[in-house]
Image (spheres, rainbow, N blue to C red):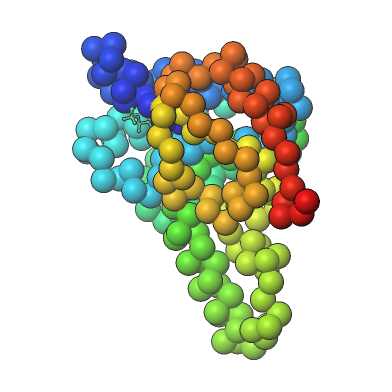
Amino acid sequence: MDGNGRWATRKGLPRIAGHREGVKSLKCIVRLCADLGIRYVTAYAFSSENWKRPVSEVSGLMKLFYETLASELEDLNKNGVKIILLGDRGNIPEKVLKRFQEAEEITENNKKVILNIAFNYGARQEIINSVKKICSLLNEGSIKADEINEKIFSDFLYTKDLPDPDLLIRTSGEYRISNFLLWQTAYSEFYFTRTLWPDFRENEFFKAISEYQKRNRRFGKI
Ligand code: FPP
């Protein structure tokens, strides 16, 4: 969801106004996914590197997550959206983590759209965590080295039980993956657009889907 800051700056507004507008885009996209039968959506909301932003922006964002999770919960739940937090739960401010956990519990049995929120997320750390857990299994003798396979590795990622993404969309004209789902996007289709996230609404989403429909996915075959 890139480009919130630039969107606001171009309009002479504080950066947080861009993040607020970005929440509206996320709502719009989740609604469209429900309509189109897209069952899994993952939004990169806050990376493990985003803590390095100015304190005022980080605290503004935390407040926004805290408020949005509360204000949208009833609506999301009513519309069958299940919320899952993907990320390191270790150093998330307690108040915000509680809101995420509450949202996860309340929406636990929903099935229409699974909305994964990547928050305090970093793919390299996720991979290292998986390696560490597999090493403990090796040390205690529960598995042998040659039994390690993709399934076991994936089972220790935050995305356990979730399918790999078919389509990855990055907004705002940046052409990089920024430590997002490095393992899971091995065969995903990538779609880049110069549109800033707050402007990424129905038409832009349909363009992305339509582009995806033209792709020929071979998964290494011919
Ligand atoms: C990147 O734009 C965006 C973020 C770091 C925050 C995105 C978060 C939301 C839209 C809130 C979602 C809310 C919930 C509850 C999931 P940027 O700041 O990097 O923009 P820039 O590149 O223009 O500076």
- Give 127 or 80, whichever is nearer the viewer: 127
The image shows a total of numbered marks equal to 0
Residue 196 can be seen, yes or no: yes
Residue 102 can be seen, yes or no: no
The x and y percentages for residue 148 are: 67, 76
Residue at horizontal 31 percent and vertical 25 percent from the top? 5
The x and y percentages for residue 86 are: 53, 47
Q: Tell which residue pokes out farthest to the front in this image.
A: 222
Residue at horizontal 41 percent and vertical 29 percent from the top? 173
Residue at horizontal 67 percent and vertical 31 percent from the top? 212
Choose top left, top right, bottom left or bottom right for residue 76: top right
- Give 22 or 201, whichever is nearer the viewer: 201
Residue at horizontal 31 percent and vertical 18 percent from the top? 8
Q: Tell which residue pokes out farthest to the top in this image.
A: 11
3 sits to left or right of 136: left
220 sits to left or right of 122: right
49 sits to left or right of 142: left
- Give 80 or 102, whichever is nearer the viewer: 80
The x and y percentages for residue 141 are: 64, 88
